[in-house]
Image (spheres, rainbow, N blue to C red):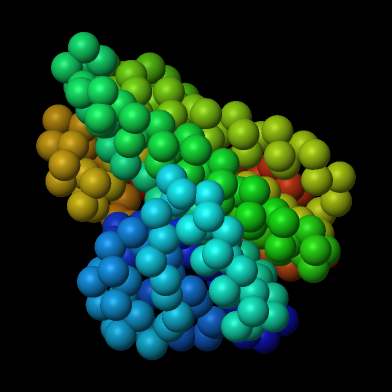
Amino acid sequence: MGARTFVVVGGTSGLGLAVARLLADEHRVAVLGDVSDEVAAVTDELGCAGGVCDVSSYEQVRDAFAAVARRYGVIDGVAACASVWAGGDLAQLSPERIRRTVEVNALGTTYVLREALHHLRRQNHGNVVYIGAMAVTKPRPGIPLYRATKSYGSSLVESLAEAQHSNRVKVMQLHPGPMPTRLQDRVGDAFLDEIYALPEQVATEVVRLLLLAPEDLYVSGEHVLRADGRW
């Protein structure tokens, strides 16, 4: 299909940055992040487009997607990688931390998927890959809020995928295990499994899903578990 246009939300670090790097050589990439200096550094490194976008703001998400659509005329795929960590017993989390986690992981995911599907449906083709977490498949002590918000995203994706009624617009999700990323640095080694994948390794699976063509025999709702070196 030649060069295509992809939006990587949360593409300034970790898995999102690894996805943007894999795509940038052969495709048009727009990286969205909430820190202007980080967006500038990535766009300089990759020679790609970028924009400052706090996904907790619907207006910023709407405007960022509209800007990409105006610039390139089409959006072929979206990697929804933006996420914040919230570890610790619920009683130990500040109200501010609780609010920010819900705003980014739940509301932000909703806004990103809403705008992504708006553009993909208008074009009648394209792929969305939501980056979840293995935490949603099994309760794990110490991360009740993080798991709850990522479970929200997973449930939303499942419902949206079922509603597509066409293979031309695919809504998919991938659930990595803990990886050595900036988010993992904040988490601590206690949550890093003995067997794990690097962001660059998981990124190849994200890109594989993003590059699926409308006629490829993968239906909306593709669900990839344990992209962490085991499965």
Residue extending farthest to the top is 91
Residue nearest the viewer, comparing 185 with 113: 113
Q: Residue furthest right?
A: 165
Q: Position of residue 52 (x, y in %)?
A: 38, 66
Q: Position of residue 129 (x, y in %)?
A: 57, 53
Q: Which quadrant of the figure has residue 150?
A: top left
Q: Nearer the viewer, residue 41 or 65?
A: 65
Q: Nearer the viewer, residue 113 or 103?
A: 103
Tell how many labels: 0
Name the residue at 71% across, 39% down: 160
Q: Is residue 46 above or below residue 130?
A: below
Q: Is residue 181 visible?
A: yes
Q: Where 136 sits versus 11, above or below? A: above
At 48% from the left and 35% from the top, the residue drawn is 106
In the displayed structure, 133 sits above or below 229; it is: above
- In the image, taking residue 3 as reference, residue 140 lies left or right, namely left
Q: Position of residue 14 (x, y in %)?
A: 30, 58
Task: Kindly identify the residue that appears in the image at 30 percent across and 26 percent down.
Answer: 98
One can see residue 205 in this view: no
Give residue 216's position: percent from left, percent from top: 77, 62
Compared with 6, 137 (above or below) is above
* Residue under the image location 64 percent in, 74 percent down: 69
Query: Looking at the rendering, in which quadrant would you find the N terminus?
Result: bottom right
Q: Horizontal placement of 108 versus 222: left or right?
A: left
